[in-house]
Amino acid sequence: MNVALPQSMPALKKLQASPGLDFVPEVEIPAFGARDVLVQVTHAGICGTDRHIFEWDQWSQNRIPLGITTGHEFCGTVIKVGPAVTRFSVGQRVSAEGHLACGKCEACRTGNAHICDYVRIFGIDCNGCFATYHSVPEENAWAVHPEIPDHIAAVFDPLGNAVHTVMTAGVSGKTVLITGVGIIGLMAVTVARAAGAAQIIATDVDPKRLALAKELGADETFSAREPWVSQVREVTGGRGPQVVLEMSGHPQAIRDGFEALQPGGTVAILGIPSKEITLDLSSAIIFKGATVHGINGRRMFETWYQMERLILSKRLLLDPIVTHQIDMQDFERGFRMMQTGEAIKVVMKIPQ
Ligand SMILES: [Zn+2]
Ligand SMILES: [Zn+2]
């Protein structure tokens, strides 16, 4: 099928070395190679990472090349396929893994493409999906099951982070503490519940998020504005949780999580501290015989299959997490609502 493409498209770009993003009405349509699919993006999720880029913090100043189109979470429809593409056709609804792995390094060749030596992430290292058209390699594209709605398919990326963390730690039949219930922490609550966690405890500074964590399946919640370690011990029969899922990146939450952990327990860390932190390794990890996992991205594509099956099982509660759907032109409001805490997850509708 030969679909005529327009001359240009609107896109959200990072043009200035200062806070904000620019809505650019006329940008060149992305080129696509023999093994790429060109996607007409319909919905895109605003990630915490996009917020860093919007706010132009230290991390983004060091990482983001000015001029790129931002965004890495989306769903849309395949509109063109390169001549070597075999698994996708025009008209198919897709999302995509945002980590572009090289496919050739040792990590890639041993089933660990999520920690590829040469990984590039779209919307961070190269042009992303906050635009009407976005080109992705066929290997990265993911066919969206017809029963999964667009606004959920647009948040596969963070949901995959949550699934990867929960599955790596192993929560079935265990007591689980989740430190930090932002977007991915909240997703981890519902995923841990679906994966058979025996008891789920959440901590956060925001009472609204803690209330939502309860709605999603947390048994107990504690405000991180006050010391909580002894209370968490108490509600886990004096032993402490067997699993800690660290989603805050906050130094004190990380230290408290290790302190609360039961001896022989497992910690999976996804939250990213903004700088080096101190931790007493002897008491936190060594003498406790703790197992610690660092979590990066999603396993390609094991996490994606798990995620799809969990969604289709109807055991995940995701609608309460995607609190707002707005037009892309209204992006500033979306970022402001995330900053004030009014919104949890914001999905943008992309102009067609
Ligand atoms: Zn993201
Ligand atoms: Zn690689």
Image (spheres, helix red, strand yellow):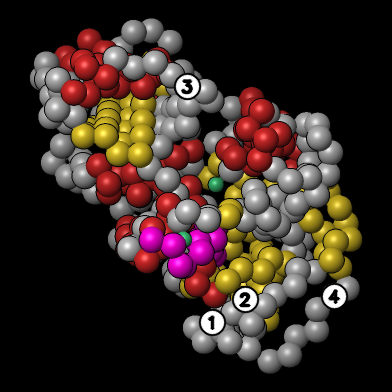
**Disc 4 vs disc 2: which is toward the camera?**
2
Residue on which the image places disc 3: 276
* Labelled pair 1, 2 in contact (Cβ < 8 Å): yes
Q: Which amino acid does label 1 sit on?
A: Phe
**C-alpha separation, residue under disc 4 versus residue under disc 3:** 48 Å
Q: Earlier in the sequence, mark 4 or mark 1?
A: 4
Q: Earlier in the sequence, mark 2 or mark 3?
A: 2
Ligand 1 within 8 angstroms of badge 4 C-beta: no
Q: In this view, does 342 lie above or below 149?
A: above
* Labelled pair 2, 3 in contact (Cβ < 8 Å): no
Residue on which the image places disc 2: 37
Residue on which the image places disc 4: 6
Residue 305: x percent and y percent?
35, 64
- Horizontal side, residue 92 vs residue 68: left or right: left
Q: Which of 38 and 43 is in front in this view?
A: 38
Q: Which of marks 4 and 3 is nearer the N terminus?
A: 4
**Disc 4 vs disc 3: which is toward the camera?**
3
Residue 97 colored in magenta in the image:
yes
Residue on which the image places disc 1: 88
